[in-house]
Every structure is written in C-alpha cells, then in structure tokens.
Amino acid sequence: MVDFASVSLTALKATTGLFGLSKLTFIPLFLAALTYYNYDLYDPENQPINVKSINKEYDFIVIGGGSAGSVLANRLSAIKEWKVLLIEAGGQESIITDVPILSLYLHGSRYDWKYKTEPSNTACQAMKGKRCCWTRGKVIGGSSVLNTMLYVRGNRRDYDNWASMGNYGWSYADVLPYFLKSEDQRNPYLARNKYHKTGGYLTVEDAPWNTPLGIAFLQAGEEMGYEIRDINGEQQTGFALYQFTTRRGMRSSCAKAFLNPVRLRSNLHIALNTQVTKILIDGNKRAYGVELVREGGVKQVVHARKEVILSGGAVNSPQLLMLSGIGQKEQLAQHGIKTLVDLPGVGENVMDHIAVGGMAFLIDYPISLVMSRVVNVNSAIRYAVANSGPLTSSVGLETVAFITTKYGNVSDDWPDIEFMLTSASTNSDGGSNVKRAHCLTDEFYSEVFDEINNKDVFGVFPMILRPKSRGKLKLRSANPFHHPLIYPNYLTHPDDVRVLREGVKAGLAVAETQAMRRFGARYHRKPVPGCKHLPHFTDEYWDCYTRQYTMTIYHMSGTNKMGPQSDPWAVVDPELRVYGTSGLRVIDASIMPQITSGNINAPVIMIAEKGADMIINYWTQGASGYHSNNLGYPHGYVKKRDLYSNLTYV
Ligand SMILES: Cc1cc2nc3c(=O)[nH]c(=O)nc-3n(C[C@H](O)[C@H](O)[C@H](O)COP(=O)(O)OP(=O)(O)OC[C@H]3O[C@@H](n4cnc5c(N)ncnc54)[C@H](O)[C@@H]3O)c2cc1C
Ligand SMILES: *[C@@H]1O[C@H](CO)[C@@H](O)[C@H](O)[C@H]1NC(C)=O
C-alpha cells in the first residue's frame, strides 16, 4: 500500500514549499532517517480521509477543523445515526509539522493564514511596518499544528469568573470534568490525582528531553520563594516543567488526537482545502446550511438538518458571521451586506496574551539550544529512532512559572504573569526563523542581536495573563478571501504596561539567583532602537522596550463572546448558541468572555468537549422542537449601543 518513493517526494515538496527550509541542509538526511526508522509516519492511511464528493445534506456541519472543530467532529460522529461534515480550509499535516523544534518554520508557510495586524503606534514597533504577525493554522488540526504544544489549563478563578458573569455551567467545578474527558496523562505520578486522567484522546506528557537549564529554572524558583508544583492542579502559583500535547516527543495535534482514530467512521465526512464563504440563514433566522468553495474553485451549497457549528477560530469565526449578515449593522452596511441579526459584539473584545520578547541572558556553558549545534544528522536520527533528543524540544520551552506582581493579590493564587523560561532566545538560530516568525525588522534584529548570534543564552518571556486592553476586528471587504482588519490595541490600557514592566523586573531577578548565576548568567543589556534616548533599566525604558518587541503568544480570543442576555456585547449564550438565530453555535476560542490565565489550547479543547456534550444532550434528550432555538436578543443592546465608544482605550 505505501509507496515510499512517491510519499517521500510529497514530503520533500512540502519541505521546499516552506519558507526558508532550503537553508536547513540536514532536512533531506533527516527525511531519509525518518523513512528508514519510522516509515509508518508516511502511511497516508493514518491521516484523515479527504472526502471526494460532499453530500447535499448532513445533520451537522462543522466549519473549521482546528482545535475545537476536531473535537466536535469526533464527538458528534460518535452518534452513529448522525451524519457529520467537517469542513477545513487547509490540507494535511506533514512530517515536518510533527517535529517540535521546527515549529517556527511553519510561521509564514502554506500552513499559516499569514494575518498581519494594522499598523499601530502602541505596540510591535520593532516589527516590519509596525504590524504584528498573527500566525494562525490553515491545515487540518488548525493552530494546534503550529503551536508550541504547551498544556496549560488556566486558573480555577477564570472559570468561576465566567460563571459569575452569568454564564451558567462554566464554573471551574463544571468545566474540570471536560478537561479530564480528553486527557491521557502519561506522567504516572500526575495520573493518580483527581486533577488528571488517563485514557482520553489527548496525550499529555513531560518533555522526553531537557537541557540542564530546565531544572536550574526550578531551583531559581525555589530560591525566589516559589513552590514547585503541578500548575494544572490544586494551585497555579509556582514553577514547573511544562507538559506538552505530544506523543513520544512528536506533535500530537488535535487532528492526530481526535480525528485520526475515527477516520474510518462512515458517518463522518472531512472536506479538506475547502473554505466556507457564507452561512445560509433563512427568513426565520435559522441557519440551514453553508456555501463553500472547494479546491479548483468549485462552489457548492450544503444543507444542515440540525445545526451549523462555527469553529473557524478567533479571526475567521467573527469574519464569517459578518459575511453572513450577523454583526454590527452599520459596519455590514458599509460593505453592502444585509444585516440579518444586528449583534454589536461580533469582532469586538479582541484579547490576546503578549509577552516581552527577546530578553536574553548569556551563559558560559554550551548547554543551550543553539540551533546550528543541536540540529544535525545525529539529533535527527536520535529523534527518528528514540523519539528523544533536542528535536523533541518545543523551541527551548522548558519551564513555566506563574507569579503575581505587586499589581495582583499574592494571597489570591490568581497570578498575573506567566514566565516562559527557555533554553534559547531570539538569537539562538542566528537571525533566521525567530526573527522572521516575529516579523522583526532587519535593523532591530541586527542592532540588538547580531553580536550574540548563536551564543549560548537562556530566555525569560514574561507574559501578561489578564490584559485589560481590548482590540477589534472589522471586515476589510465583503470578499470572504480578503483578510479582515485586525486592531489588537495592545498596551492601550496603562495597567497592561505596568504589569509587564513588573514582569520584566521579576525576569531579571531569575537571572540573579544562585541557580542561574552558576552558569555565569548575565542579561544582554543592549539598548534597543527606539528606546536608546531613555536611561537604561528605568521604568520608562522597559515600557518603551515592551512597545518595541511586543510578542504575541497567539492566544487571540473573545471575538464572539459568551454572555447572558443582559450583556449587550454577548454574541453567544452560555450554550454557545448565536443570539437572534436558531440552529447556529460558535464553538472555539472566540467565545471566551475573558481570556484564561495561561496558554489557551487546552481551554479551547475543553470548550469543544463541553459544547459537544450540550449538543448531544439537546438532540438526544431535551429536544422538543426540530432545531435548537435562541431567537431572543440580548436585552437592552439597542439602548446600550453608546457603550461601544467606551470599549477600547484608544
Ligand atoms: C504559533 C502558535 C503557538 C501557540 N502555542 C500554544 C501553546 O504552546 N499552548 C497553547 O495552549 N496554545 C498555543 N497556541 C494557541 C492555540 O493553539 C489556539 O488558541 C487554538 O489552537 C485555537 O483553536 P480554535 O479551534 O479556536 O482555532 P484554530 O485551531 O485556529 O482552528 C480554526 C480552523 O478553522 C479553519 N477555518 C477558518 N475559517 C474557515 C472557513 N471559512 N472554512 C473552512 N475552514 C476554516 C482554519 O483553517 C483552522 O484550521 C498557539 C497558537 C499559535 C498560532
Ligand atoms: C486578596 O485575596 C484574599 C484571598 O482571596 C482576599 O481575602 C483579600 O480581600 C484580597 N485583597 C484585596 C486587596 O483584594
């Protein structure tokens, strides 16, 4: 069955299709090693099957095969009588997307939607055109194919807070079972306690390989007075080695975890390279199907007997709602789109996590992840044979810390900063992929990092957990193939600048511990362009620095927020049904009313697990009508329209 020659050729084509991969001369040898030792990876039978022809009608249509969509397709098609169609704009994963250390190559590749934010003067000043690059997965598995695989659930208070906003069913006690439902915890110690479980679809494991810096960071944390603990367990504050959604050191995207095992279900159709251009809504405001375009430009209309579920992610979901006539009336009118449901919250409430980029600390020992040293034929073979070694490293992410700055409440266990502690930094690949993925200008990179290219360093990336700035997303045009206009409004709320400033100071303190000093740790204190006029190491300097190297952690969310009817900005209700419509839900990162305190992939998977359960319960138990119905609008949204002008801080 497996035709090695042609499959390797496809893999090689995939490789050359990736920007900059040609520079990586070891790749052909690497592929040879994989072919030899791990040929089953090439087996095309392991991937989801791209359906040849799409039927006219299904029970459920899921738009977007990303983190959430993969879970939904799996759970809904578990009901044998239901016919499910999963539609994904991108294609298949490849053996390159599997390799954790190569994830930066995927930014800007054919697996990426390649969004850029509109130019700003509050953030991303060191990026080309003062625009931040918003990498988003366009591939089956979605952004879970490009992400750095960190498994972080967030803080219990995040969910209790969602519930206190009127979102019944979303308290921590309510959502914990859905985190557990997916989980296959491979650390035997963790697997035993009530916060973890084995046997789910989603493999969660410790890194098979760390540098000595990983443990040193833990010791630094102890010196700073923090506990070392499971940050996904009883308490969050403290230090830990990261856990990853990998399987034996290789990426286990949501497609691998949730779709591959059910790829032979005959009631599940998966359409790849197929983009939905519109959700079809009838005179009763019921979503009855979608309009789509397959590869080669073939258009088709597909009907949904029960529900349309939108899981396009935080950028595409609001865009598609607007294109389908659901959004702010004035904005839709500007593009000649007839408003079917006037919902002012669509595209508002853009939230993301940003970190201060590029804080590099030089060390005296050759133990960090200098790419030119660790990525070679030996490490490729070690990866292929033993599923270990530096290639399994998620670009040096080793240790996590949750800390509370002076702007938070230390007795609360609701930290406001996450540290990503890394055995590499911006300079560790000599100015190739990190610089490109972050869209840094050549001038900025050269001036700050050229002199330490490929030198041994560690990195501290302080990330703000609950930013107060809110952005927005608008249509550029009525053309579904045009990218929307993205205004993240980073750092427009002064509190965000203050919290990150304290994060930087705490980051510098990590390097001052004995644990790090024994490696000769010293901050690379090169003043950055744009801030040189400010006295170094002052608050003003750090604030300026943060606006220069503003690093998105790609946690876009909130653009179709969930809320009770009393919330004029709510787009979906606590059962994820779009207000003012029936037969339509949004289930993905866009429904978060408040971003969670940590990396958001595990929360998105949880949201999809819970959403799937709601749908199944509705249609198998409570269903009285023939479709889910939420024709009510959020109360008072007309009266409160003027709130709109207060929503952002610019
Ligand atoms: C570079 C990067 C690193 C990250 N690192 C981490 C990490 O380490 N840990 C963590 O927890 N989180 C991380 N994240 C965030 C996390 O991966 C995402 O938040 C999560 O995957 C979002 O899931 P989603 O289902 O909302 O959207 P996505 O996974 O983005 O899925 C949306 C899918 O819908 C498809 N789609 C969109 N529109 C259409 C359409 N009209 N028709 C058909 N298909 C469509 C898209 O192609 C995509 O496949 C990272 C993200 C990125 C990009
Ligand atoms: C800090 O948190 C504790 C514990 O939750 C609480 O009792 C206290 O009131 C909080 N302090 C402030 C200033 O909010």
Image (cartoon, rainbow, N blue to C red):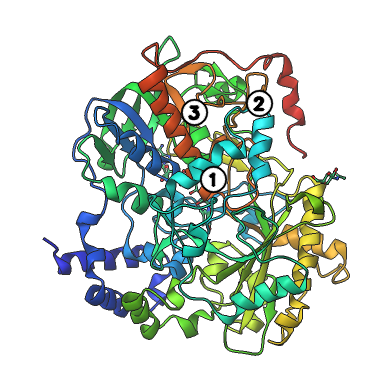
Q: Which residue is mark 2?
A: 166
- Ligand 2 image-quadrant field: top right
Q: Earlier in the sequence, mark 3 or mark 1?
A: 3
Q: CB at mark 1 closer than 8 A to ligand 1?
A: yes
Q: Earlier in the sequence, mark 2 or mark 3?
A: 2
Q: Secondary structure at mark 2?
A: loop
* Residue at 49% from the left image edge and 61% from the top image edge: 244
Q: Which residue is mark 1?
A: 603
Q: Nearest the camera: 642 or 401?
A: 401
Up the image or down, 610 lies above or below 152; here it is above
Give the amino acid type for the residue marked by disc 2 in the picture: Gly
Q: Locate residue 310, reporting x and y percent.
A: 44, 32
What is the CA distance from the residue labelled 3 to the residue labelled 1?
23 Å
Up the image or down, 410 lies above or below 605; here it is below
Q: Locate residue 205, reporting x and y percent.
A: 46, 63
Q: Secondary structure at mark 3?
A: helix
